[in-house]
Image (tube, rainbow, N blue to C red):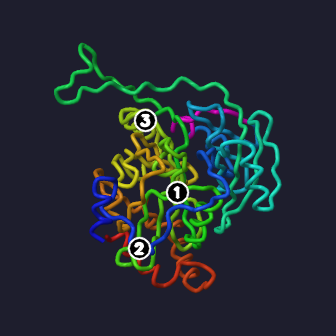
Amino acid sequence: MSHTVDAHRDLHSEQGARPGEHRHRSRQPIIKVRDIAWLEFEKPDLVRAEAFAHAFGFATALRTDDELRLRGTNSAGPCLIARKGPRSRFVGCAFTAHDEIDVLTVADAMGATPTPLPEDIGGIAVDLVDPSGIPVRVVAGLHDGVPLPAQTPHVYNMGRETLRANATQRPPRMPARVQRLGHVVLQSTRYRAALNWYLDTLGMIVSDFLYFPGQRDQGPAMSFIRCDRGATPADHHTLALALGPRTRYVHSAYEVADLDALAAGGEYLRERGYRRSWGIGRHVQGSQIFDYWRDPDGFLVEHFTDGDMFDCTLEPGWAAFTASGLAQWGPPVTKDFLGITPGPEALDELRSMAAAVRDRDNEFTLSRLGGLLKVASS
């Protein structure tokens, strides 16, 4: 055990895996996805959704009466697609394969049929469903398009190093221009089955495992999962999965230029009456500087900057899942972020807890409920 701990102390986590704990990658995945492409939602009011999107820092790639596509500055492809629907709901996510051959490979292995994407997006897709029931698209061959002008990161004077002389810092209060979609966080009642599916089917690898306080022997309860790009570093997590009493979207994160863009963009949102959920702070797993907001439909979205990038050589870390362990610095984690603010969402979660522990066809047992309840107070 001491050897494992020492191996991680100078890496990214004080604890490494114990013998026999969950594997963090598949020996023979079907394919290895390269990145996350976009998220899909349904929303009843696309005008209201677009107004928030512009304040948050997206650009509109397409707008019709029935569909809204939002993009960042890095790529012409969408990073969020919202279609008009009777109620607000998360529909699914899309991941980018290395090429169209990979799409055909995973389609054949899963018994699915590839289909062409809309002509203005380009390429092909195959529609899958993970063990949680969440729709997952694998796409490739998308048009590159033209990047948009991005915010330029600031030059900072640090200690004795003077990089900026005879010049001031005056970041304007304006929307922080979203560069790209970084990751999505999902909760599942079938967490372990879903985790194994993403490793085996999409070739993703785990950067960090979290376990409920006092329940390490019951296995992980959350995992931060990155794309395997070999020697090329990838985001610490492109997908994060957590065990919970119902399968649902938790939040998604969008990269911005730097801390000034994030903070000034937050002031812009606040002045327009939008609701901050939690921030500004710096995470532990992934190290991102974060700022969380609620969109008008109640979905949680994050601005982030300065996240960790790992290549394929790093082994996963292990840590207890605690509220105080979610950030290195910043304000205390809020009840809103944890989903325990009194209201419809918290009531739905309580009902889900009662139903989940009675349902034998999931991984959320009475014991796991006890572990989850310790997270908020840990």
Viewer-nearest of discs 3 and 1: 1
Task: Locate residue 374: give its quadrant.
Answer: bottom left
- SS at mark 1? strand
Q: Earlier in the sequence, mark 3 or mark 1?
A: 1
> What residue is pinned by disc 2?
19
Q: Earlier in the sequence, mark 1 or mark 2?
A: 2
Q: Residue at x 45, y 75 (%)?
A: 20
Count numbered badges in the picture.
3
Q: Position of residue 27 (x, y in %)?
A: 58, 62
Taking the magenta stretch, the answer to whether it contains residue 178 is no
In magenta, the rendered stretch is 53-63
Q: Residue at x 28, y 53 (%)?
A: 10
Viewer-nearest of discs 1 and 2: 2
Q: Is the C-beta separation of discs 1 and 2 under 8 Å?
A: no
- SS at mark 3? helix
- SS at mark 2? loop
Q: Please say if 106 is above or below 302.
A: below
Task: Locate residue 76: give its quadrant.
Answer: top right
Taking the image as shown, residue 366 lies to the left or right of residue 308, namely right
Q: Residue furthest top?
A: 166
Q: Is the C-beta separation of discs 3 and 2 under 8 Å?
A: no
Q: Label 3 to label 1, Cα distance in Å?
A: 32 Å
> What residue is pinned by disc 3?
265
> What residue is pinned by disc 1?
205
Q: Label 3 to label 2, Cα distance in Å?
A: 45 Å
Q: Position of residue 277 (x, y in %)?
A: 42, 53
Q: Is the C-beta separation of discs 3 and 1 under 8 Å?
A: no
Identify residue type, mark 2.
Pro
Q: Residue furthest left?
A: 160
Residue 117 marker: none
Mark 3 neighbour density, 10 Å: few (under 14) some (14–19) many (20 or more) = many
